[in-house]
Amino acid sequence: MELVCPLCNNLEEYTMECPMCKENMMDEGPIVNYLDDYSPYLPKDITQLVDGAEHDKCVHLFRCKGCNYDKRVEIKRIKI
Ligand SMILES: [Zn+2]
Ligand SMILES: [Zn+2]
């Protein structure tokens, strides 16, 4: 068995509602592709989660089509 991120592997679609304008937020891909040094840029709650998360989570960036609001979302890896 292997732990994989369902979004990176196109196993699941994940959409969420923008808290600002209620548009759909789209997955922009895993955050590791965007940032090498993430700590100063992340809000506190995410940083804590990342510290404890290690390899069972994949952090994706979601961006709103409507207002360009972006948000990091932890995706739990699944066993296949
Ligand atoms: Zn992923
Ligand atoms: Zn929005």
Image (cartoon, grey):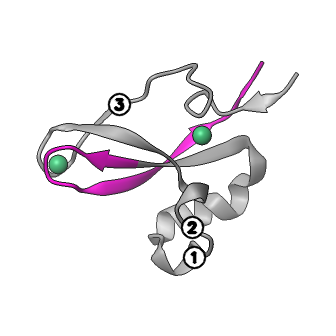
Label 1 sits on a secondary structure element that is helix
Q: Secondary structure at mark 2?
A: helix
Q: Which residue is mark 2?
A: 47
Alpha carbon of mark 2 to alpha carbon of mark 1: how far? 7 Å
Who's the residue at 60% across and 27% down the image?
A: 6
> Is residue 77 placed above or below 67 in the rendered structure?
above
Tag 2 and tag 1, C-beta contact below 8 Å = yes
Report the amino acid beneath label 1. Answer: Ser
Tell me how far mark 3 sits from mark 1, CA to CA.
25 Å
* Image spot of residue 57 (x, y percent): 66, 44
Q: State which region is magenta.
A: 62-80
Q: Quadrant of residue 28?
A: top left
Q: Which residue is mark 1?
A: 39
Residue to which mark 3 is pinned = 15
Where is residue 64? Give x, y as percent. 24, 46
- Tell me residue 42's x, y (percent): 48, 70
The reply, left or right, for residue 18 in relation to residue 1 is: left
* Residue 63 horizontal side relative to residue 49, left or right: left
Q: Nearer the viewer, mark 2 or mark 3?
A: 3
